[in-house]
Amino acid sequence: MTSREIAGKTIEFDEDGFLANPQDWDKDVAQELAHEVGIDELTASHWQVIEFSRSDFDERGEAPTLRRLKVAAGVPTKDLYELFPKKPAKKIAYVSGLGKPHGCI
Amino acid sequence: MWDEKETDRKLCIICSKGTLDMAYPGLVLANAALMEGIDVTIFFTFWGLDMITKREMSNLKFTPIGNPHKMNFGNRTIGIPNAVAGFPGMTNMATSMIKKEMDKLEFPEIPEFLEMITDAGGKLYACRLSTDMFQLHEEDLYEGVEGIVGATDFMELSEDAQIIFI
C-alpha cells in the first residue's frame, strides 16, 4: 500500500498499483490517472465507459469485463481498444478508480 | 502508480479441436493476450476449422464420451457413464449444460468471441491442408478470417512468437 497526492488529494494505492478505495476517486483524479496511462484528454466516450464502470462496480463489486462493457454498456470492442489502447480492461479500471480487474473476458 | 509496460510479445495459438470444451481455451487465451497488448495470431487446423466454418461455428458440441470428469458443478454432479453417454440426445444434453454454465459466466458464444478477438486486432488464419481436405473455401469461413495459409506461411507468421497448441 502506497499513497500519493493526486489532484490535491492524498490517495492510497493497493499492492497492484490500483486505487485502494474507490470512494477517493473524483473526476479530477480520473483526469490525472488518465494522463498516467497515456490518455491526454478524457472525451465524452471515455466518460461513458468510466461512468458505466463505476456504477457497475457499485452494483456487482467488481470492475466490468470488456464483454460486459460491450453488451451492457453498448460500447463496441473496437472502440474500447481505441479509447484505452493496449490494455483496455486494466486502463479502464485504473482510470475509473477501481481495483485491478480479474475477469477473463 | 501505473507501471504497466508496453510489450512486443507475440503469441500464436494453434486450434486443432472442434469440440466446445476445446474451442474455448484458445479463444480465452487469445482474448486475454489481446487485453494485455500482446500481438495474437490464431491458426485453425483440422477439427479446429469448425470454429471458423460458418455452418458449424454456432453448433460446436461437447460430448461426455471418454471423459472421466464427473462434471461437478458445485454440489451438482452430472456424471454420465460411458455406457450411457453414447445414447441419442446425450451429446446435445451435455452441450446445453455446458453452454448454460458458460452463459452464467457471461462468456460469449463462439462467433461473438471471434468478433471480439478480431475487433481487438487478433488475426485468424485457416490451414490450407485442412481446408483442402474438408473441401472448404474462403466463402465457407467466418468473414473475420484473414486467409487460408500453408504450414510454411504459418512459420513466417509465427516468427519470434510464443506458440500454444490446443
Image (cartoon, coloured by chain):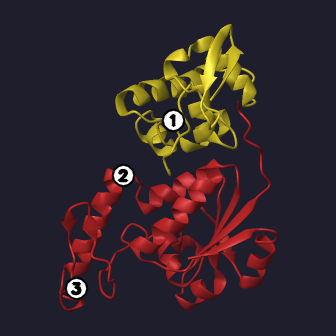
Of A56 and B87, which appears nearest the observer? A56
Q: Colour of chain A?
A: yellow
Residue B32 visible, this orientation: yes
Q: Earlier in the sequence, mark 2 or mark 3?
A: 3
> Marks 1 and 3: same chain?
no
Report which residue position mark 3 lands on: B85
- Give amino acid for label 1: Val
Q: Position of residue B26 (x, y in %)?
A: 54, 67
Rendered residue at 34%/75% (across/down): B62
> Marks 1 and 2: same chain?
no
Q: Residues within 10 Å of mark 3 (few under 14, many from 20)?
A: some
Q: Which chain is red?
A: B
Q: Residues within 10 Å of mark 1 (few under 14, many from 20)?
A: some
- Give amino acid for label 2: Leu
Q: Residues within 10 Å of mark 2 (few under 14, many from 20)?
A: few
Q: Position of residue B117 (x, y in %)?
A: 58, 55
- Give amino acid for label 3: Ala
Which label number is shown at residue A75? 1
> Marks 2 and 3: same chain?
yes
Cβ–Cβ under 8 Å for marks 1 and 3: no
Chain of the residue that carries numbered disc 3 in the rendered image: B
Rendered residue at 40%/59% (across/down): B109
Report which residue position mark 2 lands on: B105
> Is residue A39 toward the left or the right of residue B105 in the image?
right
Element under disc 2: loop
Q: From the viewer's perspective, is the residue at label 1 or at label 3 nearer? A: 3
Q: Position of residue B105 (x, y in %)?
A: 36, 52
